[in-house]
Image (tube, coloured by chain):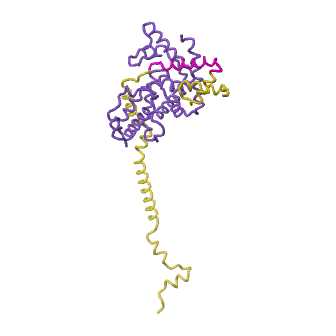
Amino acid sequence: MGTLSASRVEELMSAYLDGEISPEDAQALEGHLREQPETHAELEALRRTKALVAGLPRPVAPVDFYEQVARGLRRRARTDPAAWLLTLAIPLQVISIVVILVVATIYMLMQLEQVPAGKLQRDLSVSPSDDSEVTQSQPPTP
Amino acid sequence: MATSERSNQAEAGIPAAELSRTPSEVPDEADARDRRDRVLVGRAREGNERAFQELVVSYQDRIFGLMLRMIGNRQEAEDLAQDVFITLYRALSGWRGEGRFYTWLYRIASNTCKNRIKYLKGRNFHRSVPVDEASDLDDPRTTPALQSVVPGPEAVLEGDRLERAIQQQLADLDDEQRLLIVLRDIEGLSYQDILRVTGLQEGTLKSRLHRARLALWERLRGQVK
């Protein structure tokens, strides 16, 4: 069995105490502990530290903790900008569509108003500079 | 959909005292707890407030305890613990169900705590626990531990002193070291759970936890008989 490196011992020792180690690694570490008795002191220090911390009393949340959470949720729902934006998003989309339609309609109406009333007739009328047009427009000779 | 047996279990509501045991249960118990949690999450997502309340009640002591050991200030810990559950509520719909529910909850708690510590450090918040706030021994709701195994008034005083010393030295550790010790030695999370909570690699977790414990021991050795 090879000697364990310092970094490997560091990895294995706490895990060994916590039972979070494979049987092979446990065996390797135990071999190391037998060969290096001075490491027993380190293992013992870890064990005591773990026990001391685990012995601390368990804090208890306030009796009205859930009420405080619920209150916090309601408060956030009222003031959350994201919630407001979401509330406004749908009407804004509808308003946008309406505005676009209105603007398009107004534009089309304005374009139609700019077209003179007799423009269609003028297009078919005789143009003095164009003989073909005069020929076409004159009634046929009996 | 939960089986009728699990539904009855969830409907009946497991007593808070029963639920307050650490997650370091045998795998069967951890599995049962997780199944129950998932049922409650499903119902909470549908707007069932009672289900969300049960989730909060199940874990409020542990999350509050985690915050208190990390921050060292009771009021701050209460506020942070509330933030954790508010964040949880808003994130419920996004949980994909990977891993156990409580590891996800602890991850939210851990991140909330880290962000708060970073903010407080920027404001020169002194993390050391004042002596009169160091313990919950004056709080009758606290589960006695160190003093309960030490008989007699002098021994009780000794238990108080020791507890304050441990909390003080814990508070003075590096934030990451403190978190690992709290998650493992106080909250009782398995290494697998801690890996999910912290995102560390396994070898890194083991080394850092080892160094954290040794660092704490170096600070405590002179005060421990």
B73 or B12, which is in the foreground? Answer: B12
Q: Is residue A72 left or right of residue B207?
A: left
Chain A, hue in figure: yellow
Residue B138 in which image quadrant: top left
| Magenta stretch contains residue B14 | no
- At horizontal 55% and vertical 83% (from top left) the residue drawn is A132
B120 or A110, which is in the foreground? Answer: B120
Q: Estimate the x, y position of residue B133 in percent, counting from the top left.
A: 46, 16
- At horizontal 50% and vertical 28% (from top left) the residue drawn is B113
Q: Estimate the x, y position of residue A95 in percent, counting from the top left.
A: 41, 51
Magenta segment boundaries in residue numbering: A34-57
Q: Is residue B164 left or right of residue A65?
A: right
Chain B, hue in figure: purple
A101 or A4, which is in the foreground? Answer: A4
Position of residue A39 relative to residue A140, above or below, is above
Position of residue A32 relative to residue B200, above or below, is above
